[in-house]
Image: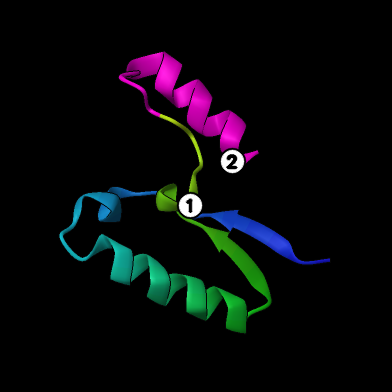
Amino acid sequence: MIRSIYLAGPDVFLPDATARFASIKSRARALGLEAWSPFDSEAKQDGQSGLGLAREIYTANI
């Protein structure tokens, strides 16, 4: 069974966030882990913010 981890933190706000998450995900795979970043979400923002958006992201990622 592959264990999944969710990558969270301030890296999402960095200009090179996509590359950073790709690097972390690659290292996680080498350790037998499946890493998910905030960019992997299929949540549709559709003008949502706050709690509504948080619930949409949670539902899409769980």
Q: Would you say residue 13 sits in the magenta stretch? A: no
Question: Which residue lies at the image location 68% right of the left edge and 77% below the top edge?
Answer: 32
Q: Position of residue 30 (x, y in %)?
A: 60, 84
Which percent across, then down, holds residue 40?
48, 52
Q: Quadrant of the N terminus?
A: bottom right
Magenta span: 45-62
Badge 2: residue crowd in 10 Å (few <14, some 14–19, many ≥20): some
Cα–Cα gap, marks 2 and 1:
8 Å
The total number of labels drawn is: 2
Residue 57: percent from left, percent from top: 49, 32
Query: If you read the primary sequence from the N terminus, does the residue marked by circle 2 or circle 1 appear first?
Result: 1
Q: Specify the label residue 40 is tagged with.
A: 1
Q: Which mark is residue 61?
A: 2
Amino acid type, label 1? Asp
Position of 60 with respect to 41 (left or right) is: right
Question: Does residue 47 appear left or right of residue 42 in this picture?
Answer: left
Label for residue 21?
A: none
In the picture as drawn, the residue positioned furthest to the right comes out as 1
User: Magenta segment, principal secondary structure?
Assistant: helix
Residue occupying image coordinates x 46% and y 54%? 37
Q: Is residue 34 above or below residue 47?
A: below
What residue appears at the point 50 percent right and 80 percent down from the top-left corner?
27
